[in-house]
Amino acid sequence: MDDGTTPGDGGDTPIRIGATEADKSQWQVFKKKAEEAGVKVDIESFTDYTQPNRALGQGDIDTNQFQHIQFLAKYNVESGDTLVPVGATEIFPLGLYTKGDRSVSAVAAAGRVAIPNDQTNQGRAINVLASAGLVTLKSKDKLTPTPADIDTGRSKVTVVPVDAAQTATAFNDGTPAVINNNFLSAAGVTAADAVAKDDPKQESAKPYINVFVTTEARKDDPTIAKLVEIWHDPEVQKAVSADSQGTAVEVNTSPEELRQILRETEDKFRAESN
């Protein structure tokens, strides 16, 4: 029987949040702070990035927090869904790492760079290499360039796409690599060791803002907005910094601007697919 409550509003039904790394300490701190604020939450753990958006669209969860805007835009365009960002969390700069002489020239001398092979991170990694002058793109207008978009004759390195987790393995075997922050510990490096990375302050970094996401119908839900506010509590941010080995850069972009970035990114994906 309907008790008149909605998830998380102080009734017995908690807000269900989808996450892919629910075991991180940041989620435990966040849950504690939410409950102190009178909001009950359940952190639903998902094993890969394909699941939380589907679960949200199907009503199995109320919001998710695991992705950046570009990932969401690609999902919406490909699935036909209309999920929306409701709050910003962080940007995690993507870095290039090499052993020994930590310099761009050393990477060029190596001649090869391992990069993640999933479309979103692969394109971002190639853009990092382009910004560092290691590869030249045939066109600078593509949102997520692929190896086929690299002008190999004018580039200093060849890219080697591998599973994201294997970039750390390639690095440990002596190949320079672009490594996602969650695999840095496996490579035995920290964000400070990067020889190049994307700049979270640049306009081009905006699609990589990580976000809380919900359905169009709940984009103005005050309880979900409260959760976004709680995420920026100093204790939660301290845990985020610890979990990310200092790579996280806090972002407070407004929901309205986040949605504008989403629309622009979706339009670019549609244009590239035509």
Image: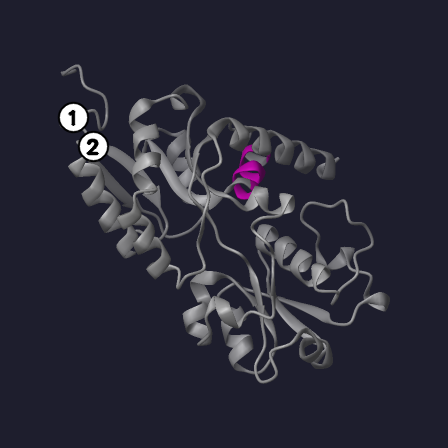
Q: Which quadrant holds residue 118?
A: bottom right
Whether residue 148 appears in this view of the structure is: yes
Name the secondary structure under disc 1: loop
Q: Is residue 256 left or right of residue 103?
A: left
- Percent from the top left, x then y, of residue 160? 66, 69
- Against 210, residue 56 (above or below) is above
Residue at horizontal 39%, vertical 64%? 245
Count residues near mark 2 (Cα–Cα under 10 Å), then give few for <14, some for 14-19, many for 20+.
Answer: many
In the image, what residue type sits under mark 2?
Val
Q: CA distance from mark 1 to mark 2?
A: 6 Å
| Pointer 1 residue | 10
10 vs 19, nearest the viewer: 10
- Percent from the top left, x then y, of residue 180? 50, 61
Name the secondary structure under disc 2: loop
In the image, what residue type sits under mark 1?
Gly
- The span shown in magenta is 70-77
- Is there a contact, CB below 8 Å, between mark 1 and mark 2? yes
| Pointer 2 residue | 39
236 vs 269, nearest the viewer: 236
